[in-house]
Amino acid sequence: MTALELNHDRGRCAIDIAPGLLDDRSALADAVSGRVLIVTDRNVAAHHLPRVERALAAHRPSTLVLPPGEPSKTLASWTQALDALVDLGAQRDATIVALGGGVVGDLAGFAAASWMRGIRVVQVPTTLLAQVDAAIGGKTGVNLPAGKNLVGAFHQPARVLIDPTTLTTLDGREFRAGLAEVVKYGAIRDAAFLDRLESDAPWLLDRDADRLTAAIERAVRHKVEVVADDEREAGQRALLNFGHTFGHALETETGYTRFLHGEAVAVGMVQAARLGVLLGDLAADDADRLAGLLERLELPTRRPDDVSPAALAEHMKLDKKNQAGRIRLVLLDALGAARVRDDIDPERILEVLEQ
Ligand code: GLY
């Protein structure tokens, strides 16, 4: 088992990574206190809920099972979670266990952040994206009709339990979309990791337990280092947004139905790399190499022909990460070296979007 620690403003979060961790009843039982509310979704519940409920039986847990997917990330679901805590008679020592992907983790984390001004949350991520990104670092929240993640709070989990074997039942597209976020860590801060991902690509696609666990560990170490240095995103945490401004534009323009988040980020990372080439900062070979790796991982790397570059450019101008009317982008100087820039001429961005 790999045991990592994230030291933050208010204490420390223990992160355990081990295949089979969810079968270890004491790992789960030791992570909670007081009354327990498990928040999950229907798909995840079918595969993993019984053993989590068994492990926590002594705490007489209640369970809130939500419909799967982004439509559950609402204030209405958050109210449901709070109502469940009321029914449970949850006190300040209660725990919410978030069993699922990013939607469940963000929603359950936000309920934990708000109940009695903050109770314990244990993240048990069951998607690759949540294991390497969303479950770590304390960003919680829900969407509003006006936009994604508009309401939320920073609330660090007390514990994160990552069992890579939960990925064996994950839908293939969802799994590959998670690989995009793994590649992201290599692109922004670890070129040697990209070498490893290139050589391991066929095994990763086959979900080989050893290689996948090693990739998750390395990605999680990066996330922990970044968050420990910059919990509130005053500086380098923003580098984790590499590919995300381009990617969000693609998700928005296609109505959040055509691309999974990680798929849009894959396209966005290549567009951001190509912009670096256009600006003379990044070697063309490096951008090609990044695109090649994503293609080997069976991820999209190009804007579909029927998506208008001008419409994408408009969405990028409205991105909520922008400041003082300037588009903020994470660009590469080399593979493994990234920085935030807000001085890019919108015409150059459009040029890349048109490629
Ligand atoms: N998912 C990006 C971050 O946690 O900052």
Image (spheres, rainbow, N blue to C red):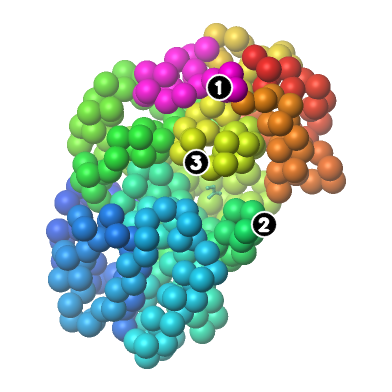
Image-based side of 128 in relation to 347, left or right: left
Mark 3–mark 2 Cα distance, whole angstroms, equals 17 Å
The circle on residue 146 is 2
Which quadrant is the C terminus positioned in? top right
Residue 218 falls in image quadrant: top left
- Residue nearest the viewer, comparing 98 with 196: 98
Mark 1–mark 3 Cα distance, whole angstroms, equals 14 Å
Residue 6 in the image, given as x and y percentages of width and height: 44, 56
Going by the numbered disc 3, the residue's amino acid type is: Thr
Tell me which numbered mark, 1 or 3, is placed earlier along the sequence. Answer: 3
Pointers 1 and 3 in contact (CB under 8 A)?
no
Mark 1–mark 2 Cα distance, whole angstroms, equals 26 Å
Going by the numbered disc 2, the residue's amino acid type is: Ala
* Residue, disc 1: 304
* Residue, disc 3: 257
Going by the numbered disc 1, the residue's amino acid type is: Pro
Q: Secondary structure at mark 3?
A: loop
The segment highlighted magenta reads 288-306
Residue lying farthest top? 285
303 in the magenta segment: yes
